[in-house]
Image: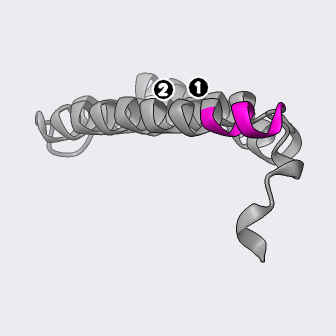
Amino acid sequence: MSSMLASYLTLAAILFCIGLYGVLTKRSAVIVLLSIELMLNAVNLNLIAFSKYGVVPSLKGQVFSLFSIAIAAAEVAVGIAILIALYRNRGTTNVDEFNELRN
């Protein structure tokens, strides 16, 4: 494993851990969405690093990363729309108070 690949993987692991910490500990739904995006960006960084420094370098990882970015943008648009609707109904973005679907 080359030193550049190791540094990319280390950076991606750090970003993923920060995102995971944000998802598990924060109560604001906006922060949770941002943390999920951070985790997706760490995965994209892994895809691009393995695409460039892998055993058989090709563009497959980079193309897959572009599709992942497009899906993440759609996910953010839908997530923010849901959060705006919930904020208008409840007056808060605290994820602990969104329990309507449990019943």
Most common SS among magenta residues: helix
- Name the outermost residue toward the bottom: 103
Q: Is residue 87 left or right of residue 25?
A: left
In this figure, which colouring scheme has been used for the structure? Answer: one colour
Q: Secondary structure at mark 2?
A: helix
Task: Name the residue at 37% across, 29% down.
Answer: 73
Q: Is residue 4 left or right of residue 55?
A: right
The x, y position of residue 35, in whole percent, is 66, 33
Magenta-span inclusion, residue 89: yes
Badge 2: residue crowd in 10 Å (few <14, some 14–19, many ≥20): some
- Res 39 quadrant in image: top right
| Residue 43 higher or lower than 49, as above or below | below
- Res 91 quadrant in image: top right
| Residue 69 higher or lower than 99, as above or below | above
Residue for badge 2: 8
Magenta-span inclusion, residue 13: no
Q: CA distance from mark 2 to mark 1?
A: 5 Å
Residue for badge 1: 11
The x, y position of residue 50, in whole percent, is 31, 38
In terms of depth relative to the viewer, which is nearer, 54 or 31?
Answer: 31
The x, y position of residue 24, in whole percent, is 81, 48
Q: Amino acid at mark 2?
A: Tyr
Q: Amino acid at mark 1?
A: Leu
Q: Secondary structure at mark 1?
A: helix
The N terminus sits in image quarter: top left
| Residue 54 in sight | yes
- In the image, the segment drawn in magenta is 85-91
Task: Name the residue at 43% across, 39% down.
Answer: 75
In terms of depth relative to the viewer, which is nearer, 64 or 55?
Answer: 64
Q: Is residue 69 left or right of residue 59?
A: right
